Image (tube, rainbow, N blue to C red):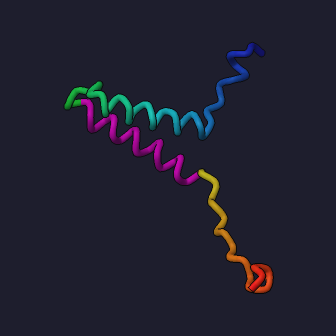
Amino acid sequence: MTEQTQNNNITLQDLVTVVQIIDACSERGAFKGEELAAVAVVREKFNQIVKANMPKEEPKEEPKEAEAGV
């Protein structure tokens, strides 16, 4: 197997990067008006995959009164 075939997996970070690239291009006016709808659909699909697969942040536990020295 070549290095190229071994590295064909798309990661969550790759999708995050694609969304960021689309946002940067949009801010810089890189898309024509008739392209915007298609770009928005693809961006939203990628963004939903990213949101669904991001690790959930654990809620921070408040220190108990005894542990807080109160």
Give above or below for 70 relative to 9: below
Residue 7 image position (x, y, % from top left): 69, 23
Left or right, 52 with respect to 8, comes to left
Query: Residue 34 lies in what quarter of the image?
Result: top left
Q: Which residue range is magenta in the image?
A: 35-53
Instruction: Look at the picture and state if 12 lies above or below 57.
Output: above
Nearer to the camera, 42 or 14: 14
Q: Position of residue 35 (x, y in %)?
A: 26, 30
Query: Quarter of the image containing the C terminus?
Result: bottom right
Residue depicted at 40% across the width and 40% down the height: 43
Residue 61 figure quarter? bottom right
Q: Nearer the viewer, residue 23 or 32?
A: 23
Q: Residue at x 40, y 38 (%)?
A: 42
Q: Residue 30, position in %: x, y?
A: 29, 25
Residue in view at x 43 percent, y 31 percent:
21
Q: Please determine whether, in this image, residue 64 is positioned above or below residue 52.
A: below
